[in-house]
Image: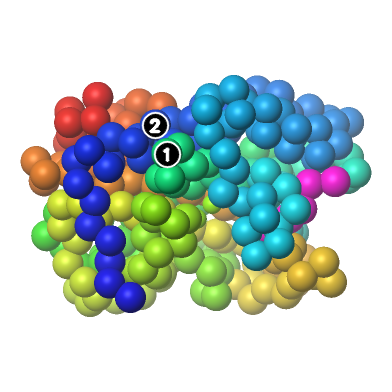
Amino acid sequence: MAIQIKTLEQLKIMRKAGLLVGQTLELLRSSIKVGMRTDALDAIAEANIKRGGGTSNFKGYHGFPATICVSINDEIVHGIPGDRVIEDGDVVSIDCGAIIDGWHGDAAISVGVGSVDPGDQKMMDVCEESMWRGIAAGGAGVKLSNIGHAIEEYVKSQGTYGILQEYGGHGIGTEMHQEPHVLNFGKPGSGPEITAGFALAVEPMITRGTHKTKVLSDDWTVVSADKSRGAHFENSYCLLPDGKVFVITALDGGRSKLGALGVEISDLLA
Ligand code: MG
Ligand code: MG
């Protein structure tokens, strides 16, 4: 399947969807507390997406029953919200997506709740920074695999972490998951050239142990095979006709984090 190249007008709509996702994740980050059930987070997300004029792209996706994924500790991605109660020191990964006028946004954060283990906090910080490094490496005119290479290089420079291999980022547009698949590891210089109109979700998933995973009997929840804790960060970004990037799911378009890495952000979606 060909990579969907978006026009500036289409990317403007994707920014609306992305902004709603980013705002919903910030609301969840500020709402999450010890003692809360994970389905309470789901209800907050559902209401906020509705209030913002969007619909969930997760609910009903291959039968997924909820608005967000909530994955705790050794659960890395695709956890189903329910009656599980968040405990002190939990690492909670929340993945959220929304559709506005047929265009998708997709992003994820990991949040430490209460007294967080310093090693868990470092893992989350490394995962988040690797996502920004991946986006920074994915500018106009470079090959797609440069993104995964930058992610892997940064993660490896920071310690011994497992980088999940069976899961990765993706193109995004009129579907949540499009071509191309975006690996979180590998050699630079291969794959399609990134050009204006690309929109990609970059989403490293790492653990404090193995990269190997298992899927629980609910057929969704992905856990680390060695029960080590994991983190997941994701943003959706695009390449604009001016040759610059913009992170559609970041409240500031990626200005602060990418600016620190020397990347210029487009003004075309401001
Ligand atoms: Mg996601
Ligand atoms: Mg995604």
Q: Which residue is mark 1?
A: 101
Looking at the image, which is closer to me, 205 or 218? 218
Residue at horizontal 82 percent and vertical 66 percent from the top: 218
Left or right, residue 25 beside residue 226: left
Q: Position of residue 201 (x, y in %)?
A: 41, 53
The label nearer to you, 2 versus 1, is 1
Q: Position of residue 32 (x, y in %)?
A: 73, 29
User: Given contact means CB atoms under 8 Å apart, are the residues at marks 2 and 1 in contact?
Assistant: yes
Which of the numbered marks, if any, corresponds to residue 61?
none
Earlier-in-chain disc, 2 versus 1: 2
Looking at the image, which is closer to me, 232 or 6? 6
Label 2 near ligand 1 (CB < 8 Å): no
> Which SS type dominates the magenta stretch?
loop
Q: Position of residue 91 (x, y in %)?
A: 71, 44
Residue at horizontal 73 percent and vertical 74 percent from the top: 214
Residue at horizontal 17 percent and vertical 28 percent from the top: 267
- Is residue 81 a member of the stretch shown in magenta? yes
- Using the image, determine if residue 9 lies above or below residue 106: above
Residue at horizontal 54 percent and vertical 44 percent from the top: 97
Secondary structure under tag 2 reads: helix
Q: Which residues lie in the magenta part?
A: 76-82
Which of the numbered marks, if any, corresponds to residue 16?
2
- Using the image, determine if residue 21 lies above or below residue 205: above
